Image (cartoon, rainbow, N blue to C red):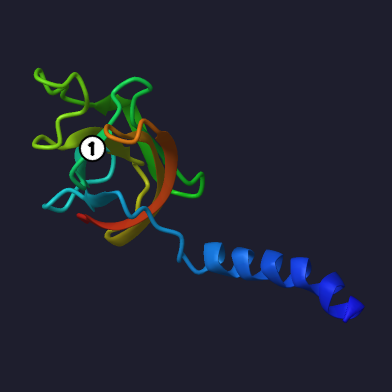
Amino acid sequence: MQELRLYTPILFLLASQLAFAGGLLSNDYVRLVVQPPSTAVRPGSSAVVELHFTPVDGIHINIDPPVQFALDSATAITLTGKPAMTKDPDTGYLSTTTPVRQTIVLGKNTRAGKLSVKGTVTYFFCSESEGWCNRQKQPVEFTIFVKP
């Protein structure tokens, strides 16, 4: 019985690490869809990635602090400026009818073909009725097609 008490915390820790590594952690309050450029992009040129947020009823996305978009360091893409966000004039929060837009620039030596891009989107969302807020740091992955 004492062995069980000793190993239980270790099992919970391992299970939580496996869930995170497998991408099982999710946000039940906000759906995030990343839309890469719809056309192929030439090396050295810029394009726009759109972030579409869809919160459930009673949840809003904060504009302050702003949405942040970061790419893994191994990618051949750099971000230009900060994400462009639209404030809902009625609520003062992020407008979910207009996507957040992030300008990217492909490296000049990027090879033609499919380019897998990984990154992280960080944002704050709040419950209007329950009075709580959370920070979400969500991993994202998408593909960009690079012209020869």
Provide the secondary structure element on which disc 1 rests. loop
Q: Position of residue 72 (x, y in %)?
A: 48, 46
User: Of the residues shown, which amino acid type is indicated by label 1?
Assistant: Ser
Seen at 54% across and 67% down, the residue is 19
Q: Position of residue 138 (x, y in %)?
A: 41, 48
Circle 1 sits on which residue? 45
Q: Position of residue 66 (x, y in %)?
A: 34, 24
The quadrant in which the N terminus is found is bottom right
Seen at 46% across and 64% down, the residue is 23
Q: Which class describes the residues within 10 Å of circle 1: few (<14), some (14-19), or many (20+)?
A: few
- When asked about the image quadrant of residue 9, the answer is bottom right
Up/down of 111 relative to 96, above or below: below
Up/down of 2 relative to 49, above or below: below
Position of residue 35 in the picture relative to residue 129 (left or right):
left
Residue nearest the observer in this picture, 38 or 145: 38
The quadrant in which the C terminus is found is bottom left
Up/down of 16 relative to 95, above or below: below
Extreme bottom residue here?
Answer: 1
Seen at 38% across and 22% down, the residue is 65
- When asked about the image quadrant of residue 69, the answer is top left
- When asked about the image quadrant of residue 43, the answer is top left
Q: Position of residue 33 (x, y in %)?
A: 23, 52
Residue nearest the observer in this picture, 32 or 77: 32
